[in-house]
Amino acid sequence: MGHLTINHVIRAIYGLGYETMEITGPQMVLTMKLTTFAWNVWDGRRPATDLDKWQTEKRIIKYPSLLEFLGYSFYFPGILVGPYLDLSEYRSLIHETVFDDDKVKEKTKGDKKLPSGRKRNAYGKMVMGLIYLGIFVVFGGNNNYSTALTPWFMEHQLFVRIFLFQIYGFLERSKYYAIWTLTEGASIVTGLGFTGFNASGQSTWNGAANVKVLEIEFPSNFKVLLDSWNMKTNVWLRECVYKRVTPKGKKPGFRSSMITFFTSAFWHGIASGYYLTFLMGGFITTVARLARNNIRPLLLPAPGQPQSELKEIYDIAGTTLSALILNYSASPFMLLTAKDSFTAWSRLGWYGHIIVFGGLVFFYAGGTSYFKKLQIEAGIVPTGKKPTAN
């Protein structure tokens, strides 16, 4: 991570933007792989009783040869921008143990181990990746977050500016959708990502996915949104940072979330915009958790009952607010500098800050106690217990 940071500094000195291809991208992927490898080795030396499910499955007891280690580190389809994978996944791919299943054997002929459908899925990802790339090339040039810094943007009413910003957000993300979908397809060609068979008997290849576009653009809540973006990096942050900084026997909380978001910002680079985005992300995660734990249980239907209108309104509001806050909080990530980020936020009426910090004030100023009382009266939680999401 230290060497990566040095290269981030060099990139900043020479003013290289994110569109310039240089060493930091591949080095970011290597950082994930090598730190995961180190933790897996450490878990291999710990008692199995101290490990959770992921740590038990990924622990390294038998060390790789130099050739195997280099093959893992420089796995070709993911060397530039991912997807990131751990050593156990790489080994199951290379030795084809991931296909040692009776269902797979039933659907293959002769000595063939790989189930059919791999190329079809890979080529489908290639087509979708090219479509996202075309959207970015055709529409993204003059329609991006930096447009908020122009005099033209201020000629519009606040409502129109906020609406335009949602479009800019999708167009900014389309380039990431393109590269991650293309590399997912390349990984599937090698056999990575096999996840079994669907109800109709066709093979599924979702294990190499790094992004779920529909769940990002139309998320049911902010947690679903975060879990669907840069998914492999989320696994790394969760397993190598979030869980590791949480004291044994305690549940992760605000401190663990903020350390994780700061690590993600530091890993991305030294631009102040990264830190603004991930700092905001920590507060967003907290207020989203408070809303889910306090409000959602009151709206869930009883077993066997249809969903209420209030629950439908809650879901629509959750999707709308998640999308609005995403495009607001993600803009510094692309604008890079604090000055440009604050300018853009001010031209949006600081709506993201009003929603997030307004929500925090509401819950901590008595909202949590009020909803806890309602949950107790409704028999959702016993007296003396904190409300929890179902």
Image (cartoon, helix red, strand yellow):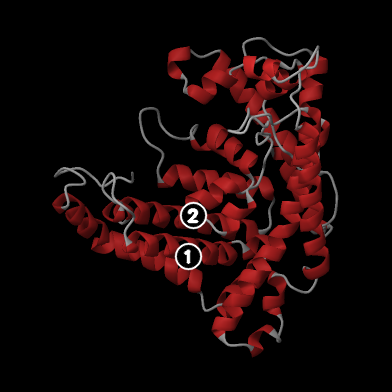
Q: Earlier in the sequence, mark 2 or mark 1?
A: 2
Crowd tier of the residue under label 1, counting other residues whose Cα lies within 10 Å: few below 14, some 14–19, many 20 or above? some
**Depth check: 300 or 326 in front?**
300
Q: Is residue 27 visible?
A: no
How many labels, in total? 2
Residue displayed at 77% across by 32% down: 118
Q: Which residue position holds label 1?
A: 321
Q: Is residue 121 visible?
A: yes
**Quadrant hosting residue 34:** top right
Q: Are marks 2 and 1 in contact (CB under 8 Å)?
A: yes
**Quadrant hosting residue 12:** bottom right
For residue 222, which numbered disc appears in the image?
2
**The N terminus - image quarter:** top right
Residue displayed at 44% across by 34% down: 246
Q: Position of residue 62 (x, y in %)?
A: 66, 9
Q: Is residue 145 above or below residue 28?
A: below
| CA distance for labels 2 and 1 | 8 Å
In the current view of this chain or complex, which residue is farthest to the bottom? 155
For residue 261, which numbered disc appears in the image?
none
Amino acid of disc 1: Leu
Amino acid of disc 2: Phe
**Depth check: 87 or 278 in front?**
87
